[in-house]
Amino acid sequence: CSSVISASAQLQPAGTTGVQPSSKTQEQVMDSSQIFSVRLFQEIVLKNHPIVRQATLLSASARADVMQALGKFDPLLESTFDRKEFGNTDYYSNWSNQLKVPLWLAGADLKIGYDHFTGENVNPQYITPEQGLSSVGISIPIGQGFIIDARRNVLRQSKIMMRYAEAERVKQILSVWYAAVSDYWSWYLAFTEYMLLREGVDLATTRFVALRGQTMIGDKPPIDTVEARITVQDRQIQLAKLSIELNNRALLLSNHLWDSTYSPLELPGDAIPEQPNEKMLKPENEQIDTLISFASVQHPNLQMLRAKSARLEVERLYRRELLKPRMNLTGSLITARDRFGAFNPHYYDIAWRNYKFGVDFSLPLFLRAERGKLRAVKIQQDQLDLDLQQTDREIRNDILTSYNTLLAYRNQLEIQVASIDYQQQLLDAEQQKYALGESTLFLINSRETKLIDMKIKRAEMIAGYQKSLAKLYYNAGTK
């Protein structure tokens, strides 16, 4: 197990133990050393969950795409050699070498070459001196490709998609945490229900034993003992059902528990959930505006859409560039110098009069393919802008909806807490009347059952509040 786990409840490897409700009393079970807190749970999930680890690969994949795009700017060394000799005749011996260095500026390529072409049947335009010819030059597009070309287009889009991958990583992590924390509070609810009903079983059992003794000495009628026994059995049946529910909720919670070696962990049977305090149950009104402002900028869904929009803008610029005619200028200065420091006549050395120059021009007459692709990109941009507006509005309304739900739960909890106090007073009064012979066991059981149900209802509200709080932050794009 991870060292962070040992700071609180010790998690166990999957399959080593079953999840069984503890038999300790409620006072004993609240030992802080057994509390599996939300903070510890979050730390384990965000550190070891397989989906969280998988999400980190998205950014790594995006960086790999950028590296692949940068490969288009890698210097390229080329060399070719051809030789033909037949019948004691040296037809040709051609050796050509070139180092091409792509440049970011203007889509140009720096070229450094060395050619050595000799033989009796070499094309005269390619014949070189015995020592060969060296050259240094540049190829630059002055039409299509000057502002942006295919390799710069791919690189820019790859860098933009790194932002998309990061937003997608955050989105996956938030989804994992929202599902995990929802299961945590479902486990809290099942645990609280189990503890409340077990307390009810203990109270009913104590009352049954006391009544049985009073019946034996004639202080209470035998029918009260029968009714007390029925109450015990009924609550024991409900407790057995809740025990199954608690086991199932603990198993669902264990789905999110993994150690650093990718091995699944199980929640131990004596682990208990964190009990929310008053601070946890009180939302701060000023946080809503902060969350809305944060979501409008940092929400992963919006960041993903904005990254797509930026990528389409680069694609649009590239498609517009393809509407221009293709015209490439190529020029090189030539020298017969084969090494630095060697003697070389000035008329064979690097000079403006020793050069090669060329122009390459082409233009589709109708440009239908280029214009069609540009129009398609613009349509995608319009669709994305509408999607961005709708998503932003939905996120804002989802935040407000979750916040309203929180306020409703808070008000309900205040009423429920007061109602529980009143119900406790009714139960105490009924027990006093019963001791004086002015009430019945049926009324006491009814008051007590009602009190247990109201406490369970309070636990449901607390769990619902915490889930709504998690949903509020999830809708805002944060934890």
Image (cartoon, rainbow, N blue to C red):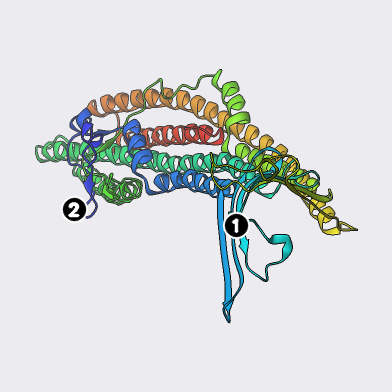
Position of residue 271 relative to residue 261, above or below, is: above
Secondary structure at numbered mark 2: loop
Apparent side of residue 97 relative to residue 412 in the rendered image (left or right): right
Quarter of the rendering occupied by the N terminus: top left
In-front residue for pair 3/231: 3
Residue under label 1: 130
Q: Residue at x 57, y 76 (%)?
A: 85
Q: Distance between the Cα atoms at labels 2 and 1?
A: 83 Å
In this view, which residue lies farthest toward the top?
286
Q: Callout 2 environment at 10 Å: few (<14), some (14 to 19), or many (20+)?
A: few
Badge 2 or badge 1: first in the primary sequence: 2
Residue under label 2: 16
Position of residue 133 relative to residue 200, above or below, is: below
Q: Callout 1 environment at 10 Å: few (<14), some (14 to 19), or many (20+)?
A: few
Q: Residue at x 58, y 26 (%)?
A: 294
Apparent side of residue 313 relative to residue 176 in the rendered image (left or right): right
- Of circles 2 and 1, the one toward us is 1
